[in-house]
Amino acid sequence: MGRYIIRRLLQSIPVLLGATLLIFAIVFALPGDPIAALAGEKRADPNIVAILREQYHLNDPLLLQYWYYISGVIFRADFGVTFADVPVSQIMAGKFQVTLNLAITALVIEALIGVGLGLWAALKRGKAIDTMILASTLLLISVPTLVSGFVLQFLLGVRLKLWTGLDIFPIAGITEGFRSYLLPGFVLAGVSIAYLTRLTRTSLAETLRADYIRTATAKGLPRRRVVARHGLRNALIPLVTFLGADLGNLMGGAVITERIFNLPGIGNQLFMSVYLREQPVVVGIVTILVLIYILANLAVDVMYAVLDPRIRYE
Amino acid sequence: MLPVEGGLGNEPLLAVDNLHVEFHTRAGIVRAVNGVSYTVDPGETLAVLGESGSGKSVTAQAIMGILDMPPASIPKGEIRFKGTDMLKLSEEARTQVRGQRIAMIFQDALSALNPVFTVGWQISEMFRVHRGMSKGDAMKKAVELMDRVRIPAARQRVNDYPHQFSGGMRQRIMIAMSIALDPEVLIADEPTTALDVTVQAQIMELLAELQRESQMGLILITHDLGVVADVADKIAVMYAGRIVENAPVHDIYRAPAHPYTKGLLESIPRVDQKGQDLYAIKGLPPNLLELPSGCSFNPRCPYRQGNCETDVPPLHQISGTRGSACHYWREVLDGDR
């Protein structure tokens, strides 16, 4: 197992390099001159522009620019500086914590509601409650985050307080600690909740048709034990994969949610940086997102081996 | 205590009496079992023989109470275990019988064992759940059982998972699990079908030996005539959800009294007929949604006469221990065609 993990980590190096190069190239290809943009509406002094271009290696070919950047990251853990001479690591610091808090809140909400509803539906298959759960997942899938975010922010963040005086969900920001993340977490998890509900329902329903469930029944075990021990333990395996892979999705997908609820996370920062053409910040954030993605997937594979004894890694 | 007590008297250990099982499907009602009756006594082996879809497994699952109802339903019949009709018991009472008094082993042990638990865990679960034993004690009992079904190095292998065993060893684990609580009736549903021939013989030997030791009643469900001959005391041949012939094992092999049984026996390959065409019963198994009128076997039967298409043959009592559901059982017995 240890050797497997090391091999997987080594394999992730080319993935990281490829992903950063790709992002680097895309940002490179963006129209407009970042140095000219620095000067705003005024025309910048051509001499200053020339000096700045030289200073930031902007006249070098793409691959050489990439080399300057990536060698700094690898050898000096230096993500570079913005054109305003602020270190990128300083911009990112603290913002990842906010997004991680948001993503983990969303993941927990997703796991609780998704698995819970899915199990309920699977056990009541064909009944009215099953149909209701399925219909509501369809609704969740169909409504984009942009809509659900603003609607819930208005209803629960603004109206709830006005109508009932209950101050549960802050409208925006992270000043209320844990409570600040509840509503954005739910909005971010929305679509995933729907998928997980359906996946759980299918997985458990399929498991309960397996031969070993018939065996467990024939052993004279109470129905509760048959479902909870023999069924659930097997149905859980695909769900863990989904949840693990979804952590990466949630962090990457936080851009819209963070904008709506004005959370100072990397999603918000990414949006601003793309807008301002802060190339080093964009590449830095994406690199770390890719890294989180890779680690989450590795964790899923390791969990797989723990949950399913038939899987062994050499 | 357990819900079923009391002496046997004249009542057999297990009696299936005029059992009917239907499945309600979108295409219509599938009549899988249409009035099956058989009995098993302690220490006796009943072989239930029949092709796929003949209702032999469904009958067994009805005895265990593990049919999914719905879609299945049991409109008629009794399943008496020591005189108590199991179909009238509460689900709770049946759970007490299931696995403890009447146990079952299945065809494909790989899919019938739970892949994510060790074999020791799965065997010892019987003692933990039904006998309230501690984990350690139950595990010791599991090792003893694995020894008893002759799994080599049981102590080392008790913590292995099902996929780490060979097919024959897996079936031994199924057997160990089923006999854990000394059941009085053991139902083996095609226990050797998924195994190769040498292993089949070992498993049958093991079952016969365990039965001798404990005087269980054994119901052996199979479509393999070869398996039956050595171990069974009596045979019930099923076709389209009915028993078409029942008899002590030797009588059937000597002279079958139903055209279907006769066809089955003649379709066994024999060394002295090498090079000749193998006999096959012509036609296809009946569609259970639309059973032929009269005798279900009539479209495939070489003895068919006029009334076969209109009258359902009752199970004619040929002797004290034999029955044949054929209007013309005398002709079949005499062997003219």
Image (cartoon, coloured by chain):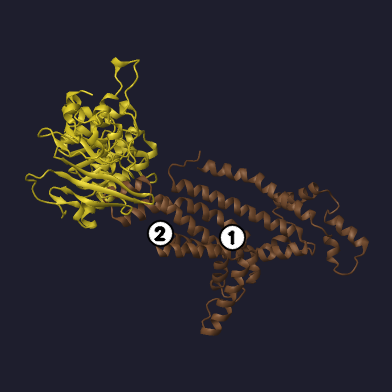
Chain colours: A brown, B yellow
Q: Which residue is mark 2?
A: A126
Front residue of A12 and B336: B336
Decide: few, some or many residues near mark 2? Use Cα within 10 Å; few <14, some 14-19, many ≥20: few
Front residue of A224 and A283: A224
Q: Is residue A131 above or below residue B98?
A: below
- Amino acid type, mark 1: Leu
Q: Which residue is mark 1?
A: A250
- Amino acid type, mark 2: Gly
Q: Relative to A252, is B80 on the left or the right?
A: left
Q: Relative to B173, is B330 on the left or the right?
A: left
Front residue of B112 and B327: B327
Residue B48 in view in this figure: no
Q: Residue at x 34, y 28 (%)?
A: B196
Q: Is residue B124 above or below residue B331?
A: below
Q: Residue at x 84, y 64 (%)?
A: A37
Q: Residue at x 56, y 77 (%)?
A: A155
Front residue of A162 and A92: A162
Which element carries disc 2, helix, strand or loop?
A: loop
